[in-house]
Image (cartoon, rainbow, N blue to C red):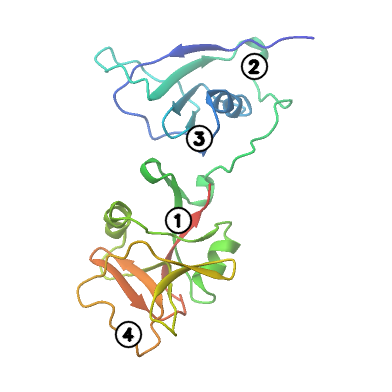
Protein backbone atom coordinates (compact mmCIF):
# COMPACT_ATOMS: atom_id res chain seq x y z
CA UNK A 1 0.00 0.00 0.00
CA UNK A 2 1.39 3.42 -0.93
CA UNK A 3 1.89 5.93 1.85
CA UNK A 4 1.55 9.71 1.68
CA UNK A 5 3.98 11.81 3.70
CA UNK A 6 3.12 15.20 5.14
CA UNK A 7 5.78 17.33 6.85
CA UNK A 8 4.88 19.93 9.50
CA UNK A 9 6.90 23.13 9.92
CA UNK A 10 6.00 25.07 13.08
CA UNK A 11 5.81 28.80 12.33
CA UNK A 12 5.92 31.73 14.76
CA UNK A 13 3.83 34.78 13.81
CA UNK A 14 2.31 37.51 15.97
CA UNK A 15 -1.06 37.84 14.22
CA UNK A 16 -3.17 35.03 12.82
CA UNK A 17 -4.04 35.80 9.15
CA UNK A 18 -7.72 36.25 8.31
CA UNK A 19 -7.59 34.79 4.79
CA UNK A 20 -8.39 31.24 5.92
CA UNK A 21 -10.39 28.89 3.68
CA UNK A 22 -12.55 27.68 6.53
CA UNK A 23 -12.67 27.42 10.30
CA UNK A 24 -14.17 24.65 12.38
CA UNK A 25 -14.45 23.11 15.82
CA UNK A 26 -12.37 19.91 15.93
CA UNK A 27 -11.37 17.26 18.42
CA UNK A 28 -7.61 17.32 17.97
CA UNK A 29 -4.66 18.52 15.91
CA UNK A 30 -5.01 15.31 13.88
CA UNK A 31 -8.58 16.30 12.95
CA UNK A 32 -7.29 19.71 11.86
CA UNK A 33 -4.64 18.03 9.70
CA UNK A 34 -7.25 15.76 8.14
CA UNK A 35 -9.42 18.80 7.36
CA UNK A 36 -6.46 20.27 5.49
CA UNK A 37 -5.79 17.05 3.61
CA UNK A 38 -9.39 16.95 2.42
CA UNK A 39 -8.86 20.31 0.69
CA UNK A 40 -7.55 20.38 -2.87
CA UNK A 41 -5.27 23.27 -1.92
CA UNK A 42 -4.20 23.59 1.70
CA UNK A 43 -0.72 24.76 2.60
CA UNK A 44 -1.06 25.72 6.26
CA UNK A 45 -3.17 25.22 9.38
CA UNK A 46 -3.56 26.93 12.74
CA UNK A 47 -4.85 24.96 15.72
CA UNK A 48 -6.10 26.43 18.99
CA UNK A 49 -5.03 24.03 21.73
CA UNK A 50 -7.31 25.79 24.24
CA UNK A 51 -10.51 26.01 22.16
CA UNK A 52 -9.92 23.09 19.73
CA UNK A 53 -10.50 25.38 16.75
CA UNK A 54 -8.94 24.68 13.36
CA UNK A 55 -8.12 27.26 10.68
CA UNK A 56 -7.31 25.99 7.18
CA UNK A 57 -5.26 28.14 4.80
CA UNK A 58 -4.51 27.95 1.10
CA UNK A 59 -1.27 29.95 1.43
CA UNK A 60 1.73 29.32 3.67
CA UNK A 61 2.55 31.53 6.66
CA UNK A 62 5.46 33.96 6.51
CA UNK A 63 7.52 33.46 9.66
CA UNK A 64 8.22 36.52 11.81
CA UNK A 65 11.58 36.29 13.64
CA UNK A 66 10.34 38.79 16.24
CA UNK A 67 7.21 36.79 17.11
CA UNK A 68 6.77 35.37 20.59
CA UNK A 69 6.44 31.63 21.05
CA UNK A 70 2.75 30.74 21.30
CA UNK A 71 2.03 27.13 22.21
CA UNK A 72 -1.72 27.77 22.64
CA UNK A 73 -2.21 28.61 18.94
CA UNK A 74 -0.06 26.32 16.83
CA UNK A 75 0.68 27.45 13.28
CA UNK A 76 2.11 25.01 10.74
CA UNK A 77 3.19 25.22 7.13
CA UNK A 78 2.56 21.82 5.56
CA UNK A 79 4.57 20.07 2.89
CA UNK A 80 2.02 17.71 1.42
CA UNK A 81 4.53 15.72 -0.61
CA UNK A 82 4.15 14.55 -4.19
CA UNK A 83 1.34 12.11 -3.30
CA UNK A 84 -0.59 14.74 -1.35
CA UNK A 85 -1.12 17.31 -4.07
CA UNK A 86 -4.89 16.76 -4.10
CA UNK A 87 -7.55 16.00 -1.51
CA UNK A 88 -7.24 12.63 0.24
CA UNK A 89 -10.65 11.08 -0.28
CA UNK A 90 -10.12 8.06 1.98
CA UNK A 91 -9.94 10.15 5.16
CA UNK A 92 -13.34 10.07 6.92
CA UNK A 93 -15.36 13.28 6.86
CA UNK A 94 -15.65 15.41 10.00
CA UNK A 95 -17.95 14.41 12.83
CA UNK A 96 -18.11 18.11 13.73
CA UNK A 97 -19.87 21.07 12.13
CA UNK A 98 -18.02 23.68 10.12
CA UNK A 99 -18.96 27.37 10.18
CA UNK A 100 -20.34 27.93 6.63
CA UNK A 101 -18.49 31.16 5.85
CA UNK A 102 -19.10 30.63 2.13
CA UNK A 103 -22.78 31.24 2.98
CA UNK A 104 -22.04 34.60 4.60
CA UNK A 105 -21.46 33.45 8.18
CA UNK A 106 -18.65 34.83 10.34
CA UNK A 107 -16.77 33.08 13.11
CA UNK A 108 -15.80 34.61 16.46
CA UNK A 109 -13.16 32.55 18.26
CA UNK A 110 -13.62 34.23 21.66
CA UNK A 111 -17.14 32.80 22.03
CA UNK A 112 -16.87 29.92 19.56
CA UNK A 113 -19.86 31.46 17.75
CA UNK A 114 -20.74 31.19 14.06
CA UNK A 115 -23.20 33.97 13.17
CA UNK A 116 -24.84 35.93 10.36
CA UNK A 117 -26.97 39.11 10.28
CA UNK A 118 -29.99 38.94 7.98
CA UNK A 119 -33.10 40.88 6.99
CA UNK A 120 -36.48 39.36 6.17
CA UNK A 121 -39.97 40.69 5.45
CA UNK A 122 -41.79 37.46 4.69
CA UNK A 123 -41.14 35.00 7.51
CA UNK A 124 -40.04 34.86 11.13
CA UNK A 125 -36.37 35.30 11.97
CA UNK A 126 -36.02 31.83 13.44
CA UNK A 127 -37.64 30.21 10.38
CA UNK A 128 -35.27 32.15 8.12
CA UNK A 129 -32.28 31.08 10.21
CA UNK A 130 -33.30 27.44 9.91
CA UNK A 131 -33.89 27.76 6.18
CA UNK A 132 -30.48 29.44 5.80
CA UNK A 133 -28.88 26.47 7.53
CA UNK A 134 -28.51 28.14 10.93
CA UNK A 135 -29.72 26.63 14.17
CA UNK A 136 -31.61 29.47 15.86
CA UNK A 137 -31.53 33.16 16.59
CA UNK A 138 -28.28 34.28 18.23
CA UNK A 139 -27.93 33.69 21.97
CA UNK A 140 -26.46 36.73 23.80
CA UNK A 141 -25.95 35.36 27.29
CA UNK A 142 -23.04 37.42 28.65
CA UNK A 143 -21.87 41.00 28.90
CA UNK A 144 -18.92 40.11 26.68
CA UNK A 145 -21.28 38.97 23.91
CA UNK A 146 -23.41 42.08 24.35
CA UNK A 147 -20.30 44.25 24.05
CA UNK A 148 -19.25 42.41 20.87
CA UNK A 149 -22.54 42.02 19.01
CA UNK A 150 -24.21 45.31 20.03
CA UNK A 151 -21.77 47.50 18.06
CA UNK A 152 -22.34 45.30 14.98
CA UNK A 153 -25.86 46.78 14.75
CA UNK A 154 -25.74 49.96 12.62
CA UNK A 155 -27.50 53.02 13.99
CA UNK A 156 -31.03 52.29 15.20
CA UNK A 157 -31.42 49.10 13.16
CA UNK A 158 -32.16 46.96 16.19
CA UNK A 159 -31.68 43.30 15.46
CA UNK A 160 -33.61 40.34 16.84
CA UNK A 161 -31.83 37.80 19.03
CA UNK A 162 -32.98 34.75 20.94
CA UNK A 163 -35.30 35.34 23.90
CA UNK A 164 -39.06 35.35 24.64
CA UNK A 165 -41.23 36.76 27.39
CA UNK A 166 -43.58 34.25 29.02
CA UNK A 167 -46.89 36.18 28.98
CA UNK A 168 -48.27 34.52 32.10
CA UNK A 169 -45.32 35.45 34.31
CA UNK A 170 -43.43 38.20 32.48
CA UNK A 171 -40.26 36.12 32.82
CA UNK A 172 -37.77 36.12 29.94
CA UNK A 173 -36.66 32.70 28.77
CA UNK A 174 -35.20 30.55 26.01
CA UNK A 175 -37.49 28.00 24.40
CA UNK A 176 -35.79 24.63 24.12
CA UNK A 177 -37.74 21.72 22.61
CA UNK A 178 -41.06 22.82 24.08
CA UNK A 179 -39.69 23.81 27.49
CA UNK A 180 -38.36 27.10 28.79
CA UNK A 181 -35.06 28.00 30.44
CA UNK A 182 -34.72 31.37 32.19
CA UNK A 183 -32.34 33.75 30.43
CA UNK A 184 -29.19 33.99 32.58
CA UNK A 185 -28.28 37.47 31.32
CA UNK A 186 -30.14 40.55 30.07
CA UNK A 187 -28.53 43.95 29.50
CA UNK A 188 -31.51 46.24 29.00
CA UNK A 189 -31.15 49.43 27.00
CA UNK A 190 -32.17 52.56 28.99
CA UNK A 191 -35.96 52.71 29.29
CA UNK A 192 -36.40 49.04 28.40
CA UNK A 193 -38.42 46.87 28.59
CA UNK A 194 -41.30 49.18 27.72
CA UNK A 195 -43.90 47.06 25.96
CA UNK A 196 -45.15 44.51 28.44
CA UNK A 197 -48.75 45.56 27.83
CA UNK A 198 -48.43 45.85 24.04
CA UNK A 199 -47.35 42.35 23.11
CA UNK A 200 -43.62 43.05 22.83
CA UNK A 201 -42.65 39.56 23.89
CA UNK A 202 -39.48 39.04 21.83
CA UNK A 203 -35.91 40.27 22.23
CA UNK A 204 -33.89 42.63 20.04
CA UNK A 205 -30.43 44.16 20.33
CA UNK A 206 -28.61 47.36 19.43
CA UNK A 207 -25.45 49.10 20.60
CA UNK A 208 -27.24 50.50 23.70
CA UNK A 209 -28.43 47.14 24.98
CA UNK A 210 -31.38 44.79 24.68
CA UNK A 211 -35.02 45.71 23.92
CA UNK A 212 -38.37 43.99 24.15
CA UNK A 213 -39.93 43.97 20.67
CA UNK A 214 -42.94 42.67 18.70
CA UNK A 215 -42.57 39.07 17.62
CA UNK A 216 -43.05 39.36 13.86
CA UNK A 217 -39.25 39.32 13.32
CA UNK A 218 -39.81 41.10 10.00
CA UNK A 219 -36.67 43.09 10.43
CA UNK A 220 -32.97 42.47 11.01
CA UNK A 221 -31.91 39.48 13.08
CA UNK A 222 -28.82 37.49 13.99
CA UNK A 223 -28.68 33.79 13.16
CA UNK A 224 -26.41 31.43 15.06
CA UNK A 225 -25.07 28.25 13.52
CA UNK A 226 -24.50 25.81 16.37
CA UNK A 227 -21.11 24.11 16.13
Cβ atoms under marks 4 and 2 closer than 8 Å: no
For residue 116, the mark is 1
For residue 189, the mark is none
Q: Is residue 110 above or below residue 128?
A: above
User: Disc 2 designates what residue?
Assistant: 84
Q: Residue at x 28, y 55 (%)?
A: 143
Can you tell which of label 4 and label 2 is closer to the viewer?
Answer: 4
User: Disc 3 designates what residue?
Assistant: 21
Pointer 1 or 4: first along the chain: 1
Q: Residue furthest right?
A: 1
**Label 2 to label 1, Cα distance in Å?**
34 Å
Residue 3: name its quadrant: top right
Q: Residues within 10 Å of mark 2 (few under 14, many from 20)?
A: some
Cβ atoms under marks 2 and 3 closer than 8 Å: no
Can you tell which of label 2 and label 1 is closer to the viewer?
Answer: 1
Q: Residues within 10 Å of mark 3 (few under 14, many from 20)?
A: some
**Label 3 to label 1, Cα distance in Å?**
17 Å
User: Disc 4 designates what residue?
Assistant: 195
Is residue 184 rendered to the left or right of residue 85?
left
**Label 4 to label 2, Cα distance in Å?**
61 Å
**Label 4 to label 3, Cα distance in Å?**
44 Å
Q: Residue at x 26, y 55 (%)?
A: 147
Quadrant where the N terminus lies? top right
Amino acid sequence: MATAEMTFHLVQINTLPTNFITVMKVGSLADCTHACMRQAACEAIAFSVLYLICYVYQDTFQSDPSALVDMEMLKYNLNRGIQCTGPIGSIPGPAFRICPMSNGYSYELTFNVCYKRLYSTNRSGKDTCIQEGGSDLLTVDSQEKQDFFGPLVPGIEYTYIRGDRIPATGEWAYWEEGTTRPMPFIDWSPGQPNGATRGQDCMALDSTGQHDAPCNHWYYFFCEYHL
